[in-house]
């Protein structure tokens, strides 16, 4: 249930409601708003509990919440959430955030060249995996802690905030010390120990949809992070696995407006993994913008044919520049600001 307090409810009245909810063995989560406070509840709510709470001073109404994802739902938080990656605002109608860079941090030289290219083309943030989960144990799996140092150097050189993946709860602190945003990859979307760990720290989280996950499963994974106290979650549609063989994944463009309807959280799109082919990245990226995405996650490499990871789906810097020139036209066509967020 969602307990909506009156506009003039006092702190003492709010505290009394929180305490009464706890007495029923239910977890309360206060949600202060611009005009009034609401209190979300998590656990099995009985009719007796709802009636007891509704009778308390300061309570305007008790609203049942039908969605299994509570904190992520527009039923609980109707207004769009803005998440900040460094100085870049994502969501709630802010300019599109374009996060770009190589799939993996494979060397200092490549990372710095890619970062400068992303910056010169107007990108908002730099992506790059210091730790990489790979299907084969023999594939390049990133540079680890050394890769984090390279990313920090790239940020110093360009001013771009850093988005990088974290694979295990034990790595969260080390990655959070460097990253401006922690990415949870598709393979880890339902790694609940990892979700709990990143929910316990304050840095924003970019949560990618699992390869075979439903929209509801993605939102329930976001709920793990939100329920631990970290409200800075960005959702990412990156394609799902289907029977189609011509593309790496099937990019689910209808998931973008559906998520925007169901949740207040920002939604971005990853057409690189969504297609697996560099020549499909730009048209699908533009389709995602047209569908209402708050940003894009694009793989960019100075020399994709030499990339140690995902070269075939990576744009060259020139191709990325062409994409960045096309994005404002689509944004303008759907009535969105033409600007792309700058760091």
Image (spheres, rainbow, N blue to C red):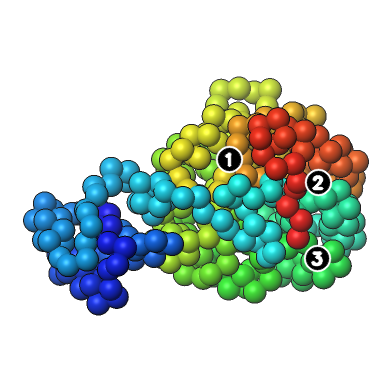
Circle count = 3
Place residue 16 in its image quadrant: bottom left
Place residue 299 in its image quadrant: top right
The residue wearing badge 3 is: 159
Q: Earlier in the sequence, mark 3 or mark 1?
A: 3
**234 vs 24: above or below:** above
The residue wearing badge 2 is: 300
Q: Residue at x 56, y 23 (%)?
A: 243
Which of the labelled discs sits on residue 237, or is there none? 1
**60 vs 235: above or below:** below
Q: Earlier in the sequence, mark 2 or mark 1?
A: 1
Nearest the camera: 264 or 176?
A: 264
- Classify mark 3: helix, strand or loop: loop
Place residue 288 in its image quadrant: top right
- Classify mark 2: helix, strand or loop: loop
Q: CA distance from mark 3 to mark 2?
A: 17 Å
Q: Residue at x 28, y 73 (%)?
A: 10
Q: In the figure, is residue 220 to the left or right of 106?
A: left
Q: CA distance from mark 2 to mark 1?
A: 18 Å
Camera-nearest label, 3 or 1: 3
Q: Is residue 190 visible?
A: no
Instruction: Give neighbour class at mark 1: few <14, some 14-19, many 20+ (Cα, 10 Å).
Output: many
Q: Earlier in the sequence, mark 3 or mark 2?
A: 3
Residue 240, image x, y percentages: 56, 34
Instruction: Give neighbour class at mark 3: few <14, some 14-19, many 20+ (Cα, 10 Å).
Output: many
Residue 217, image x, y percentages: 42, 43
Residue 254, image x, y percentages: 54, 29
Labels 2 & 1 near each other (Cβ < 8 A): no
């Amino acid at each position: 249930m969602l307990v909506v307090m009156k506009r003039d409810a006092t702190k003492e009245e709010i505290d009394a409601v929180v305490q009464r909810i706890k007495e029923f063995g239910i977890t309360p989560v206060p949600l202060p708003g611009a005009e009034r406070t609401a209190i979300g509840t998590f656990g099995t709510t009985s009719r007796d509990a709802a009636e007891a709470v509704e009778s308390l001073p300061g309570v305007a109404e008790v609203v049942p919440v039908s969605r299994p994802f509570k904190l992520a739902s527009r039923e609980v938080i109707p207004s769009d959430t803005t998440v900040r990656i460094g100085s870049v605002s994502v969501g709630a109608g802010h300019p599109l955030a374009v996060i770009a860079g190589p799939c993996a941090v494979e060397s200092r030289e490549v990372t710095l060249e890619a970062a400068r290219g992303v910056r010169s083309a107007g990108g908002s943030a730099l992506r790059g995996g210091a730790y990489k989960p790979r299907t084969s144990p023999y594939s390049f799996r990133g540079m680890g802690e050394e890769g984090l140092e390279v990313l920090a150097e790239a940020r110093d050189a360009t001013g771009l905030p850093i988005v990088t993946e974290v694979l295990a709860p034990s790595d969260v602190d080390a990655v959070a010390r460097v990253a401006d945003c922690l990415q949870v990859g598709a393979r880890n979307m339902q790694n609940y120990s990892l979700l709990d760990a990143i929910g316990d720290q304050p840095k924003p989280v970019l949560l990618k949809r699992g390869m075979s996950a439903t929209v509801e499963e993605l939102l329930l994974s976001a709920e793990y992070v939100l329920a631990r106290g970290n409200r800075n979650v960005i959702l990412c549609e990156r394609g799902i696995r289907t029977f189609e063989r011509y593309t790496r994944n099937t990019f689910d463009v209808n998931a973008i407006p559906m998520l925007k309807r169901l949740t207040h959280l920002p939604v971005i799109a990853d057409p690189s993994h969504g297609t697996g082919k560099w020549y499909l990245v730009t048209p699908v990226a533009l389709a995602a913008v047209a569908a209402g995405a708050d940003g894009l996650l694009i793989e960019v490499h100075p020399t994709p044919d030499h990339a140690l990871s995902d070269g075939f789906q990576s744009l060259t810097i020139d191709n990325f520049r062409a994409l960045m020139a096309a994005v404002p036209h689509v944004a303008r066509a759907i009535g969105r600001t033409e600007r792309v967020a700058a760091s």
